[in-house]
Amino acid sequence: MVRAVFFDFDHTLYSHTQKDIPQSARDAVKALQSKGIMCVLATGRHLVELRHFPQAFELGLDGFVTIDGQICLDKDFNVISSSRLEGKLLESLVSLFDSKKAHVILIEKDRMYANTPKQSSDATITLIRHSVGEYTGKPLYMGVVYIEPEKEKWLSSLLPGGRLLRWGAPGVDVVPEGRGKPAGIKAFLNYYNIAETDYMVFGDGMNDVDMIKSAPLGIAMGNGADSAKEAADYVTTSVDDDGIRNALLHFGLMV
């Protein structure tokens, strides 16, 4: 029985071609909720960023698994689960931030800021929005490092206890080892007393692979990365071709 559905945001729920959430996806969310199925966002983005996409809040979603599962929120944006960066990983990430050897974004609960004004020039994504600032000493929950894939080994050597989650060609998210969207989803399920066998996920990116693999039913979008498709139980059509609705129709969750 499916009691919750988790959706990635960029290129899954939200179309960067249409610059909107397709009407078919909006209808799908309403159809699921009418059956008592919770609809939850599971994204690498911070709530601060999501506020630049008002469409994400028009849906009346039942919760938010944000910054790759590091902070989970209920529908009223109350924190129900969080995981901070600590120890050597925290120290090393702040050291990299201060050294400016790479463009680094530090993420607090209510703020995100960078060590330089440089941003990605990748036109396929909406740029991460941030201000330039200094580390305040407040708890950090995630880092973002703009670095080419061939330099990941170098970055890993600088961040003991860290895990790199590549979200695209420009860069990676940094979370503690063992963390990621599946950990955030598990915390969300536990909070609402939903069995770990009773949910499904939709995703498209490299940072969705673990989420898709670990779910009882993992759906990859037709426009997704090859790695996401290979991990999926089912590959639907693209976000611009009613992918969410078509998958729900396929599995009998929508008529």
Image: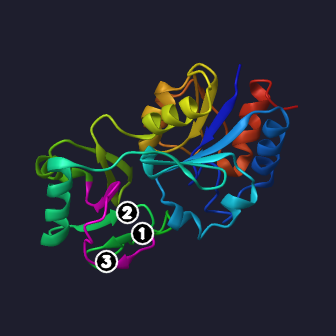
Rendered view: 200 above or below 120: above
User: Is residue 109 placed above or below 127 in the rendered structure?
Assistant: above
Seen as rendered, the residue at the extreme right is 255
Q: Residue at left 25%, top 67%? A: 137
Amino acid of disc 3: Lys
**Can residue 117 be seen?**
yes
Q: Are marks 1 and 2 in contact (CB under 8 Å)?
A: yes
The stretch of residues the image draws in magenta is 128-148
**Is 7 left or right of 61, judged from the image as shown?**
left
Give the prevailing secondary structure in the magenta stretch: loop
Gap in angstroms between the C-alphas marked 3 and 1: 18 Å
Which residue occupies the foreground of this view, 23 or 180? Answer: 180
Residue matched to label 2 = 108
Q: Residue at x 48, y 36 (%)?
A: 228
Q: Which residue is drawn at the image coordinates 25% and 76% (left, top)?
A: 134
Question: Which dot, 3 or 2, sits closer to the camera?
Answer: 2
- Which residue in the protein does label 1 denote? 111
Separation of disc 1 and disc 2 at Cα? 5 Å
Quadrant placement of the N terminus: top right
Question: Does the segment drawn in magenta span residue 181?
Answer: no
Left/right placement of residue 208 relative to residue 254 reads: left
